Amino acid sequence: MPQCQIFTAAEIDLFRKSGAILRGCLEYLAPKAVAGSTTLELDRLAEEFIRSKGGLPAFKGYKGFEHTLCTSVNEEVVHGIPGKRVLQDGDIISLDCGVVYEGIITDACLSVGVGTISPEAAKLLEVTKKALDAGVAAVRGGGRTGDISAAVQRVVESGGFTCVSALTGHGLGYTVHQYPDVPNIGKAGTGAMLPVGTAIAIEPIVTAGTDDDLSMGDDGWTLSMKDGALSAHFEHTIVVTEKGCEVVA
Ligand code: MG
Ligand code: MG
């Protein structure tokens, strides 16, 4: 049976430092996702920010990915490649980023609206963020990944939206993705046990449609909703504690 990696106090301190750079980066970027900017400009700003704080972009070079950010716009769900696309008023964009600091990787994402967005898009962002908060609140040492899955699923479905079932959160540490998977659909009390001192990324990925089929772009990375529905993505990296967790990014 695979087991969750347990980190030392010194390593957990590195998660905090890695996460502080990542949080700072996303806070810096969010207001820069404005109409007229390109996704490649956001990527450049993210890389400069991370390096200026002594970190390294965790996604750059991962399985051949060449950028610091994943920028997924509207019906694009995850792994959008930064490029010449110019953001338009009314778009929503997810900014997914990873930082390495002294070997320790943190992974976080937020979705923002560009200019004035539709009420449906605004609700999708709000519900997805709330689902992340509910997932984080469901963590405790000795609990199960399914506790998180059930909390996320409940908020998403009661908000009238659909979790994209093929995409999950994950363990992380010295690698970007490791055991366990943290699904966004499931039952409390099931799934992998989360020991105190392990680290996971919790990341609800949600579509405004009812169908969660994905299609792969010609670039070999970008996953989009097949039906063209809007999607949103929020993510934190957390370290499991006895009574709950510490959000590090
Ligand atoms: Mg991520
Ligand atoms: Mg992740």
Image (spheres, grey):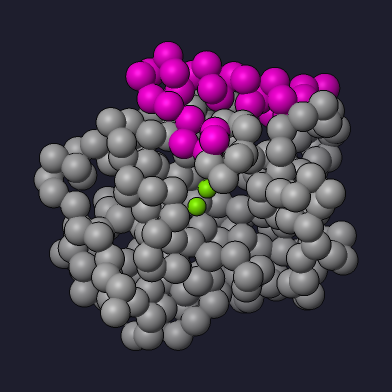
Residue depicted at x 87% and y 60%: 228
Q: Position of residue 64 (x, y in %)?
A: 60, 40
Left/right of residue 134 with respect to residue 126 in the rendered view: left
Q: Position of residue 234 (x, y in %)?
A: 55, 51
Of all residues, the one furthest to the left in this rendering is: 9
Q: Nearer the viewer, residue 161 or 173?
A: 173
Q: Nearer the viewer, residue 245 or 77?
A: 77
Residue depicted at x 87% and y 66%: 227
* Quarter placement of the C terminus: top left
Span of residues in magenta:
32-61
Q: Position of residue 208 (x, y in %)?
A: 76, 64
Quadrant in which residue 170 is drawn = bottom left
Quadrant in which residue 14 is drawn = top left
Residue 38 visible in the snapshot: yes
Q: Position of residue 110 (x, y in %)?
A: 57, 44
Of all residues, the one furthest to the front in this rendering is: 64
Residue depicted at x 37% and y 85%: 190
Residue depicted at x 37% and y 53%: 172
